[in-house]
Amino acid sequence: QVQLVESGGGLVQAGGSLRLSCAASGGTFWSMGWFRQAPGKEREFVAAISWSSTNTYYADSMKGRCTISRDNVKNMVFLQMNSLKPEDTAVYYCAGDSGSGNRYTLYTLASDYDYWGQGTQVTVSS
């Protein structure tokens, strides 16, 4: 059974940091990504990483403020977020692609991912 479980969300003051984790099980995931959805807004891309970790990509809004990484031995993906802003407040979702990709595949569209976690809330207070 494929499962993605996020953790690490919480309440943090503006300028603070959080590290989100995603535990993956039940499959091999080529591209893995983080997305977020704020109340009343559509889900948006945050960051993605290829299986080999060779390729990473970040949304413009997060460039320079976050780092995505993965540990394929432990089947974990991480999102380190720094200098957080109130506008970063959202539910953050981990996504995995188990399709016909390869170790260098990286996706930024939500429609390219076939498995999703339940989300973890991140709230940044001003």
Image (cartoon, rainbow, N blue to C red):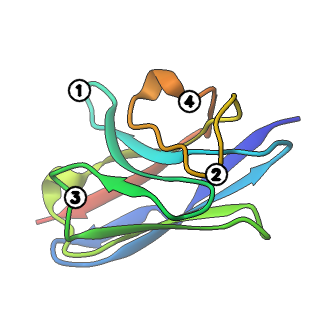
**Quarter holding the N terminus?**
top right
Q: Amino acid at mark 3?
A: Met
Can the viewer see residue 92 in this picture? no
Q: Amino acid at mark 1?
A: Lys
Residue that mark 2 sits on: 103
Q: Position of residue 51 (x, y in %)?
A: 62, 55
Q: Which mark is residue 113?
A: 4
Task: Pick whichever, 34 or 91, lies toward us.
Answer: 34
Q: Secondary structure at mark 3?
A: loop
**Quarter holding the C terminus?**
bottom left
Please tell me which of labels 3 and 1 falls first in the chain: 1
Position of residue 79 in the picture relative to residue 100 (left or right): left
Around disc 4, counting alpha carbons within 10 Å, would you say few (fewer than 14), some (14 to 19), or many (20 or more)?
Answer: many
Position of residue 98 in the picture relative to residue 39 (left or right): right
* Image marks 4 and 2: residues in contact by CB distance under 8 Å: no
Query: How far apart are labels 2 and 1 at the CA level?
Result: 32 Å
Query: How far apart are labels 4 and 2 at the CA level?
Result: 15 Å
Around disc 3, counting alpha carbons within 10 Å, would you say few (fewer than 14), some (14 to 19), or many (20 or more)?
Answer: some
Q: Nearer the viewer, mark 4 or mark 2?
A: 2
Vertical placement of 119 versus 99: above or below? Answer: below
Query: How far apart are labels 3 and 1 at the CA level?
Result: 17 Å
Residue that mark 3 sits on: 62
Query: How far apart are labels 4 and 1 at the CA level?
Result: 19 Å
* Image marks 4 and 3: residues in contact by CB distance under 8 Å: no
Residue occupying the point 34% across, 53% down = 57
Please tell me which of labels 4 and 2 falls first in the chain: 2
Please tell me which of labels 2 and 3 falls first in the chain: 3
Q: Amino acid at mark 4?
A: Tyr
Residue that mark 1 sits on: 41
